[in-house]
Image: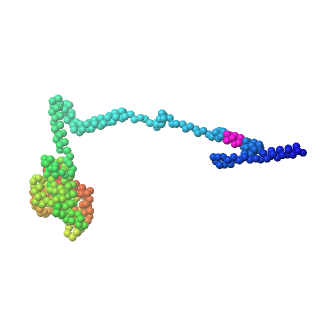
Amino acid sequence: MANKDNKNKNKSNEKKKSNVIYIDRNKKTGQISTKNTNKNTTKKSNNIEKNKSTKPKSTVKNTKSNVKKPKKLKKPNAGKSIPKKNGRKIKWGRVAIAVLLVVALGFCGVKGVQMIKGKPLNKVGSTSQSSSGDSSVSNDESSKTEDSSNSKTKPVKGQYDLDDEKKRQSKKYNIVVDAGHGGNDKGSIDSTETVYEKDIALQIAKKVASRLGRESDVNVIMTRTEDKYVSLEERAEIAKKANADALISIHLNAQKKYGDANGLETWYRNGATDGSKELANSVQQTTASYVEIMSRGILRNSFEILRETTMPAVLVECGFITNVSDMKKLKDPNYQDMLAEGIMQGTLTFLDEKNGKN
């Protein structure tokens, strides 16, 4: 019995020993850890640690195996150039040669045309048939005739310029173009009281002078080229000093109380025997054929600008400034051009007839 009791005591002691828990305080953290003396617990803990230690390894391996490595991007070949579009290269040398050939051919063509125009065929034939000495003489004569013809046909500046008057003194006809009124002398006023006769008259006179100045045998003198006052005595004196072959004075007509009178008329000197009537008739008829306006014919009067001059002289009333229809036309630059052309052509026709030219 004692032995059995001792065995029982030993077993109970073993159980007590197995259930003893050791307390260990961690000095750094202050946490309490327990130690179990039971072998079973130690085995379980060991198994857990093994499992803990083994699992991460397996996961690491799996992750390493599952993770795909990124593909390396292919770098573009720096040395290789981008393919260009198919096309022919321009050969600049050939282009330059072609341009030079075109220029040379054009130059030769121009020279050929000039030679054909400058030397008639009959002259060329005569020089080829004659001796060397005769041909040189004929060539000299032809060059002289060419120079003289060129000097006659050279165009003069279209716009009238007072600075060129001295250069034109050698021409055959001297024509004075007089723009009526000017400066403080406004002339007649339109129905709106905004347009003055002096301004429209100057515009038309400049156009007439410009067209006459293009003729190679005409020298043009204007009594005024800007808005300034020139007395009637001074205008007549300018015409006398220029030894004018004709005087054309430009004006606009007017009617009192702004009536409905309209149309074109030309005045000449009373009792004139110097051709003033013929000049007035030529200017009136020609101008009326150029513009759409009623022709009122030619009339006689002793206006001072006509009375004080000694050459064929006319005063052209280009329309009525007091008439709305006439005034609308007179302000139009295109209509002024046609008026100026008619006056110019009528003047030249008179001069040609007077000097026996057909």
Q: Is residue 291 left or right of residue 50?
A: left
Q: Please give the name of the residue rendered at 74% of the width and 43% of the height, measured from the top-left corner.
A: 42
Q: Which residues are magenta?
A: 49-58
Q: Nearer the viewer, residue 320 or 266?
A: 320
Q: Residue furthest bottom?
A: 257
Q: Nearer the viewer, residue 80 or 90?
A: 80
Which quadrant of the figure has residue 150?
top left
Which quadrant of the figure has residue 60?
top right
Q: Nearer the viewer, residue 58 or 275?
A: 58
Residue 128 percent location from the top left of the image: 20, 31
In the image, is residue 53 part of the stretch drawn in magenta? yes
From this viewpoint, is residue 356 visible?
no
From this viewpoint, is residue 2 visible?
yes
Which quadrant of the figure has residue 266?
bottom left
Q: Residue furthest top?
A: 132
Q: Main secondary structure of the magenta part?
A: helix
Q: Please give the name of the residue rendered at 16% of the width and 36% of the height, measured from the top-left corner.
A: 141
Q: Is residue 84 left or right of residue 163?
A: right
Picture layout, residue 9 above or below residue 227 = above
